[in-house]
Amino acid sequence: MSIRFLLLILIIALTVAAQEEPNIEQMPNIPDKYLKAKDKAFENFDQMLEKARERIQEENIISQDILEKMQEENPALYRRMLMKTWAELEKLNYLQAKDQNLYETSKERVQLEIQTWKLAIKYRQTEDETEKESIKAELREKLDSLFDLRELEKKQRITRLEEELAELKEAVQIRQANKQDIVTNRLNDMIGQKDELEW
């Protein structure tokens, strides 16, 4: 992926997070060569949002009517929710192959985050004050659990990083101990000299 495209996506994400319509022309210090790609980037951004919406419906995360109502009532919140949910689902796909414990925790966290989104939407749509208070209390309880899950997820990431660091340190020590053999093998490889003992 090109740096130009990543820069444009970052700019778009930041402006969406600020709940404003993206307007690259008003942003300072952006060279003209990046501005030429803006239409393509916005087209790709809209396509990404549409794919996110399709994925959310496939996973049966949020119903069609709730999505439409959210899009109509609060477009900025709708876009943010789509982007965040899409990113989380993609991250889960990656983790499933790499780290099963972290995957399970992350999956549980994503499901809980989705529940909190649904409760927030329900709260905004409810007019009865008693029901609103009940929804608010349930939302607070789920947010409390969500906080704990997020912290557990961070601890699991730290553990995984510490394991990777230990493996990397061990590999460096082995390579340092075998430096001359490694350099000789690379030299022979680069100059085309075959090792007589090679399989």
Image (spheres, grey):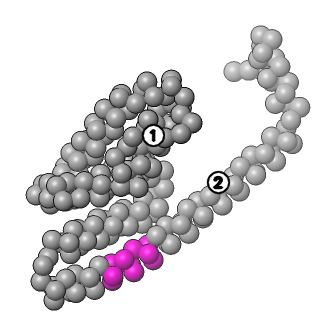
Magenta stretch: dominant secondary structure: helix
- The kind of secondary structure element at disc 2 is helix
Which of the two residues, 31 or 85, is positioned nearer the viewer here?
Answer: 31
Mark 1, residue position: 26
User: Seen from this angle, which residue lies furthest bottom?
Assistant: 130
Q: Tell me if residue 166 is in the magenta stretch.
A: no
Q: What crowding class fits label 2: few (fewer than 14 Cα within 10 Å), some (14-19), or many (20 or more)?
A: few
Q: Residue at x 14, y 76 (%)?
A: 126
Badge nearest the viewer, 2 or 1 = 1
Q: Residue at x 80, y 11 (%)?
A: 191
Task: Specify the amino acid type for callout 1.
Answer: Gln
What is the x, y in percent for residue 193?
A: 80, 11
Choose top left, top right, bottom left or bottom right for residue 139. Answer: bottom left
In the picture, the quarter occupied by the C terminus is top right
- The kind of secondary structure element at disc 1 is helix
Residue 146 got which mark? none
Task: Specify the amino acid type for callout 2.
Answer: Glu
Asked if residue 60 can be seen in this view, the reply is no
- Find the magenta span and give its range: 140-149
- Distance between the Cα atoms at labels 2 and 1? 44 Å
N-terminal of the pair, mark 2 or mark 1, is 1
What is the x, y in percent for residue 87?
A: 38, 50
Q: Tell me if residue 145 is in the magenta stretch.
A: yes
Choose top left, top right, bottom left or bottom right for residue 72. Answer: bottom left
User: Seen from this angle, which residue lies furthest top?
Assistant: 192
145, above or below 37, in the image: below
Q: Residue at x 22, y 87 (%)?
A: 133
Which of the two residues, 144 or 129, is positioned nearer the viewer here?
Answer: 129
What is the x, y in percent for residue 27?
A: 49, 41
106 left or right of 66 in image = right
Q: Are marks 2 and 1 in contact (CB under 8 Å)?
A: no
Mark 2, residue position: 164
